[in-house]
Amino acid sequence: MTDIVRYLTHPQVTIDPAIPVPSWGLSEIGRDRTEAVTATRQLSRTTRIIASGERKAIETAEIIAAKLKVDVEVREAMHENDRSATGFLMQDEFQAVANQFFAQPQISVRGWERAVDAQLRIVREVEQVLARNDRGDVLFVGHGGVGTLLYCHYLGVAIDRTCDQPADGGYFFAFTREGRRVQHSWRRLEDL
């Protein structure tokens, strides 16, 4: 049986402009959505869960790991694209800047990490884990921005926001460990 790699984005978070974005935790809705995931047949072969060092990703990973009785490995460099130059942005402004981030991947938009650099970073992190050649499926838990960059990489397409997950987070895509062939595009967390 082919080992499958899944990349899951954290679901809804509690937004607090007074707290740095990497420290935001899951909202009640996000937590409920994650807790609804059970040790499904699809996840039953998962032997490793890797999370970004951001609180919301760790919380998501820990909920799933508890159900699967698997440890969580935290990799700090799997964080979302660095947006600390602007900090929190209201939704409309955030979407406008995010559109520029994806449309101009070679440029630092308003001081944000360049999309090409964020893509290199997330691909490097994923490939370092997969190079261990451990048996079983792997679940990475992270973020929508870098997740989209990773998805574009494995699809073999240029960085493009049309490959982005739907709004609100809590989506995953999958690819084969051998050959790195994308199995499907973004699906809801509830489909795990």
Image: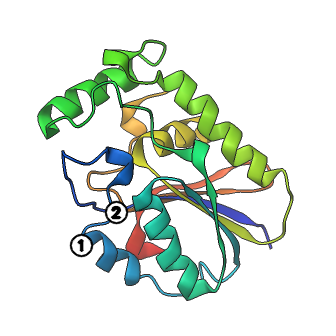
Q: Residues within 10 Å of mark 1 (few under 14, many from 20)?
A: few
Q: Give the labeled residue for mark 2.
A: 11
Circles 1 and 2, Cβ within 8 Å, touching? The answer is yes
- Measuring from the top left, give residue 51's x and y in whole percent: 57, 59
Could one spot residue 108 in this view of the protein?
A: yes
Which residue corresponds to the image point at 28% horizontal and 60% vertical from the top-left?
A: 13
Query: Most extreme residue toward the front, as rendered?
Result: 18
In which quarter of the view is residue 138 placed? bottom right
- Measuring from the top left, give residue 150's x and y in whole percent: 56, 41
Q: Is residue 121 left or right of residue 165?
A: right
Q: Give the labeled residue for mark 1.
A: 29
- Measuring from the top left, give residue 141's x and y in whole percent: 53, 59
Could one spot residue 157 in this view of the protein?
A: no
Quadrant, the N terminus: bottom right
Seen from the viewer's position, the closer of residues 155 and 111 is 111
Q: How is the image coloured?
A: rainbow
Q: Residues within 10 Å of mark 2 (few under 14, many from 20)?
A: many
In which quarter of the view is residue 187 placed? bottom left
Q: Amino acid at mark 2?
A: Pro
